[in-house]
Amino acid sequence: MRRSALLVVLMLVAGLATVAPAGALYGLNDWSCRPSEAHPEPVVLVHGTGDNKDYTWRMLGPMLISRGYCAYSLTYGVLPGAPVVGDVVGGLTPIEDSSAELKTFIDRVLTTTGKSKVDIVGYSQGTLLPTYYAKFLGGGEKINRYISLAPLWNGTNVAGAADTYALLRTLGLGWLTNLITNCAACPEVLTGSDLLARMREGGMFLPDVAYTNIVTMYDQNIVPYTSGLGEGTNIVLQDACAEDHVNHVGMPVDPNALGHVLNALDPPHASPVPCVPMGPVAPRQ
């Protein structure tokens, strides 16, 4: 029985990381861009596990640029020694290390644009990095608006992986996950992890940050999906659009979700989000 539990948790933890194909976005990371009066804060985009800055933001990036935003993205959490290629896979190193990368990147954005705060859009694991940065790395005063797609404030217990991993740790076998996956961040996003306990202690949300949490009831990776509900404005996509069956991997390309992102970035000019029927999006191979 213990052997079966071990195999289940190893497969589930490894499955949290996927390979991202190459992508190219034009307009993001234009270091000559200066925020306008209409969009005074630069926007920083933070991808998820096993992904990269180009693929995740292939839709939102061009949308922001076309609307006059100065928008920036980074690929964080790349394993040491990984080939320097366009489709490099990120989001694999410990969240503490990736958050330090985010801090350095945001410092560069602020210095270059001459601004004191950024707006952040994060997806999946990319919703936890800014939280760690805000709480432990002095970033709380540098974030204005914080929009999260498929966040996991209480982690995920997909297929009971968090429960099984907790059992392995109790047995002193937590290290076995390292045998089949090089994703150090994956166990950290499981409900009850030491990292999440640290982040939740005293509260994860800061009073001077405007939070928007966007979730889907059909999220197959963040279980339960209500783990993404927190302080600020909570948006369950199906409350306004029952025909939207988007799953976790589809969130960054769901027009309904992205409509809410644009409204959250610019509340004075928010407009109704049309209901676009969406089906599940297949994971990348």
Image (cartoon, rainbow, N blue to C red):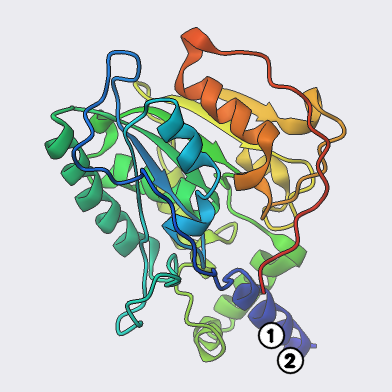
Marks 2 and 1, how far apart at CA: 5 Å
What residue does disc 2 label?
3
Frontmost residue, 125 versus 198:
125
Q: Which residue is mark 1?
A: 6
Q: Does residue 229 show up?
A: no
Side (left or right) of 114 relative to 249: left
Which three-letter amino acid code belongs to the residue tagged 1? Leu
Image position of 213 (left or right of 159):
left
Which residue does the image show at 73% across and 32% down from the upper left?
237
Is label 2 in contact with label 1 (beta carbons under 8 Å)?
A: yes
Mark sitting on residue 245: none
Q: Position of residue 189 (x, y in %)?
A: 53, 60
| Residue placed furthest toward the right | 243
Rendered position, 128 above or below 209: below
Residue nearer the viewer, 168 or 75: 75
| Residue 192: quadrant of the picture | bottom right
Q: Using the image, determine if residue 63 lies above or below residue 76.
A: above
Would residue 281 be visible to someone looking at this image? yes
Query: Splitting the image into 4 quarters, where does residue 256 fall?
Result: top right
